Image (tube, helix red, strand yellow):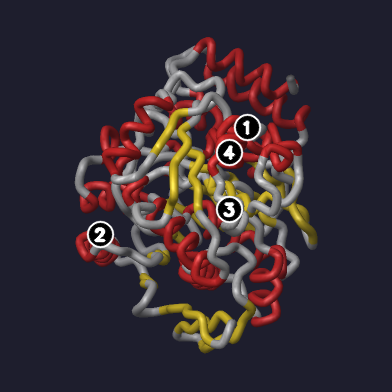
Amino acid sequence: MSEAAQEINKLMGLHPKGFDLSLDRITRLLEVLGNPQNRLPRVIHVAGTNGKGSVTAFCRALLEAGGYGVHVHTSPHLVNWHERYRIGLKGGRGQFVDDAVFAEALRRVAEANAGQKITVFEILTAVTFLLFSERPADAAIIEVGLGGRFDATNVIADPAVSVIMPISLDHQPYLGDRVELIAAEKAGIMKPGHAVVIGHQEYDAVLDVLMSTAERLHCPTAVFGQDYMAHEEYGRLVYQDEFGLADLPLPRLPGRHQYANAAAAIRAVKAAGFVVTEAMMEKAMNSVEWPGRLQRLTEGRLIAHAPAGAEIWVDGGHNPGAGEVIAEAMANFEEKQPRPLYLITGMINTKDPVGYFRAFVGLAEKVFCVPIRGSDAMIDPVILSNSAYDAGLVAEPKSTVGEALDAIKEILDPQAPAPRILIGGSLYLVGDVLVDNETPPK
């Protein structure tokens, strides 16, 4: 176990798990630390239900393509805590934080907190600001953990741009049971007079809330489909905004939903005050990466369990909105190359499994439900299988992903094409798979 992981385990023993949405504790702690959140490079602050990680990855790829140093904070991680903190390097690709540096920052923040009531996520957020404020860079991309208004990252008072990605139902106990309530929470990252970029929104009610908030705060606003847009044309990505048009390669990240994510990133980086050239955009579309999101596994230990020639994908999407875009991507794959689709799914009990599974009705042959290692919040595979049945799918519980892969081999029609297998439903499950397959993020 790394030194930083040991420090985090100590903190988890002292402080409650989960979220307690408030800015009081993090504000107190940051004051003791000298308010490092006020000494960051230009901040791109990202909220939303889905697409936060992808737009963050595109923003980073764009800026690094221009030779900028970019700090990046994301959550949760897939395999190691260090993935949450990418330290920017001028003129080159950033690197995950060094373990000794991370451990020392954790100790400094814990000492500053002096044993007072706080959540571990708030401590980790303070670590973000400490690490990023003490290392030079041109930009800091900071992803919200949960919600927006009372998320610990929302002590940022002067963002270069706030980005609101697609909003749908998720985390209802914390954020509300209607999309407009969730939108109001996410809109909380907007700051008076500061630029806002709004990504593609499925719900008019969401867009109404976001626009009314931006207007009330006098925020210059760019909206997908109105002020900027992107679409595929002859196998290329055409991006357009008020500054002009660009003819680009399709993004390296698969799925049509990534066109809108790429567009939001381009517009956000421009709104943050950076010059974005067509050469930067082209390089970014070819270099962008985001592990665990429609990531194809082509080698590794788990592949040995899979049927010969199988196409295996992993994706951490875990709510109905994510299920819809992932199912659309699978349907597009099916249109180009027909294969029977099987799901291997694990989820935690704060999610809506029926809503997630419903997107795959008529597309997936069968679901195999598996546990998530080390999670006391996982949905039991038997109960998860019942949810898949309720959604209209055939399902069966299994003890491991390996067992599920073996089961797919047993039921395959020998005359049928090799299957397409989607492993997902939780970023935690994807993390387990990447560990088992020996393919950690870099």
Of the residues shown, which amino acid type is indicated by label 1?
Gly
Q: From the viewer's perspective, is 344 left or right of 309?
A: left
Numbered disc in front, either 2 or 1:
1
Q: Which of 48 and 150 is in front in this view?
A: 48
Name the mark on residue 419. Answer: 3
Could you say which quadrant of the image residue 435 lies in?
A: top right
Between 435 and 402, the one lying in front of the other is: 402
Residue 397 at least partly seen: yes
Disc 4 and disc 2 in contact, CB within 8 angstroms:
no
Precedes in sequence: disc 2 or disc 1: 2
Q: What residue type is labelled 4?
A: Glu
Q: Mark 4 points at which residue?
A: 410
Question: Which element type, helix, strand or loop, lies under badge 3?
Answer: loop
N-terminal label among 2 and 3: 2
Which residue carries the number 1 mark?
Answer: 402
Is residue 114 depicted above or below 143 in this figure? Answer: above
Q: Mark 2 points at which residue?
A: 206
In this rendering, which labeled residue sits more in front, label 4 or label 1? 4
